[in-house]
Image (tube, helix red, strand yellow):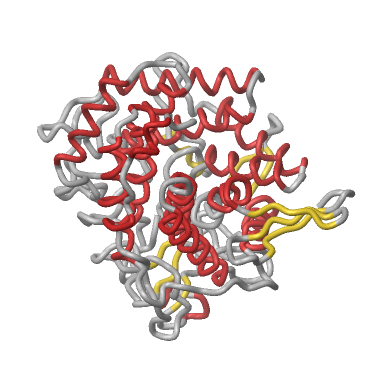
Amino acid sequence: MKPPKALTPVMPCVVAALWLLVPSLASAEPSSPRGFYLPANPSYTIVDSVRDSIRFTLDHTLKGDTQGHLVSISSFVDPDGEVMGWHDFGNLEGPGWAANAVGGAWEIWGMGEFLRQPAWKTKAVAILDHVLDGGFLDQGTGLIRAYRETTTGKFCLNYKHRSDWFCPGSMAKVAFQLLSFSDDLHGSPRSLRMRAAALACSRWLDKHLEPVPNGWFPRRITPEGKIYRLSPDGGNDHFWQSSADGLYILQLQAALTERKLADYTPQLRAKAAVFINAGGIFGSINHDTYDPQENVAYSVAFRTLLMVSRLLRDPDIRAFAYTNCLAGLDQFKMSQDRNGVATTGLLFMEKSWDTAYLWENAEAALACFEAAEDSRQTDSKLSRERERDGLVILRAISKHHIGSKGFLTEGVDWNNHVGQQHHVAGARFGAIRYTEPFLNNQHIAEPTLFYLTRLATKSKDGGRTRWSDLEGNVLFQSDRQGL
């Protein structure tokens, strides 16, 4: 997903009443680090930021095909939407990892629904249809092909343009996105196909996934489901059985169980126990990074375990999610601008690669908002702290749009880890001059939409409806005639 250091870049329910009996978690979780705060910018809100990101995706990174679908021109582009073909992701598109066509389409559809932009929703469905009809879903087996080469049309299972391995958790994530998007398209033929595809993918994993010694999930597997211990470049991967990528399998199983499409209750209980007994498994989710503690692993762990705890009605899992996963995000927070770069309010990725990448930051904001909603009735202080943290992260992200087309950088390289040849204007420290349209550029849409629909204060003033944050800052307003 990211260019590496030096000259050869390679992309790295309703809760039952018993929840009211769970003790407050505030004493177990530290407050936000001092200084981790950024005020709102009333002239450029977090909603303005999302609009720009989606504008960039829709207006500068898509093209039509002969079937009337919309197809991404690339998974790695510059601020003008030019394809970065030198990069592993440059000539790839599809639903996989940083290409993220299903997740991106779902976010565009959701923001289009909220902002009353029917053209956005139409385009989102055209992107989705490309995945549904374009050969990515193996109808016979349930396997999901992650990528298609834009130059040759060849399908491949990994970002190295090969099919010798893939990450099973990342495939499960695509299935989860299909399932979640299907809820919004409820009752339509597409929705039924999406749900069937998600279930078929999960069944493929049930049938083929080889177990690992520690009881978790393998980070990479062969097309037959056998453990693949090597890194994408052929070296030994020390995190072959300790990557948080496996959390996406739990997420899919929980979502299928919640919708009564399957019953993974025993598996969820068993794998949650493996995760907790290990003290948490936070190894890199990104396919090209290798660190025992990656910030997005903590975010995904919190969100997944919170979902599982609700489903199983297990307060111990919920407590672990808060004290070990959500609180773990604090170690990555940056409370000041570093090397003259706007980093206040951002999270660096991991100790071994300290760039602040923005899809991971957006996921952290989403985890904070889910925590804020979940704890509102049981711990209002914690709820407000995490709500504020999520807002600060999104405000910090909004400072890093580049140019006039809405482009949002993939990451803020405040410590020159990536190399200044990859920075905007060649600055020694600063924003990277590339992005992934459906992911780093656009993933801010999901936490922003969650905030607007679940946490923001909604008020009416004459014919206007306003959505404001917890500090009273107006994020968005509409009137009787529309938006």
In the displayed structure, does residue 417 sit left or right of residue 228? Answer: right
Q: Specify the quadrant of the image occupied by residue 223.
A: top left
Quick one: 295 or 79, which is closer to the camera? 295
Vertical arrangement, residue 117 with respect to residue 176, above or below: below
Percent from the top left, x then y, of residue 236? 14, 48
In the displayed structure, does residue 32 sit left or right of residue 426? Answer: left
In the displayed structure, does residue 385 sit left or right of residue 325? Answer: right
Whether residue 246 is visible here, answered yes or no, is: no
Q: Residue at x 40, y 16 (%)?
A: 262
Where is the N terminus found, in terms of image quarters?
Answer: bottom left
Quick one: 149 or 360, which is closer to the camera? 360
Q: Residue furthest right?
A: 481
Whether residue 96 is visible here, answered yes or no, is: yes
Q: Residue at x 61, y 41 (%)?
A: 71
Vertical arrangement, residue 348 with respect to residue 302, above or below: below
Percent from the top left, x then y, of residue 81? 61, 59
Q: Specify the quadrant of the image occupied by residue 22.
A: top left
Q: Residue at x 58, y 25 (%)?
A: 133
Q: Residue furthest top?
A: 140
Quick one: 85 or 356, which is closer to the camera? 356
Q: Residue furthest left?
A: 213
Q: Residue furthest bottom?
A: 340
Quick one: 330 or 415, which is closer to the camera? 330
Figure label count: 0
Percent from the top left, x then y, of residue 12? 34, 55
Percent from the top left, x then y, of residue 140? 43, 14
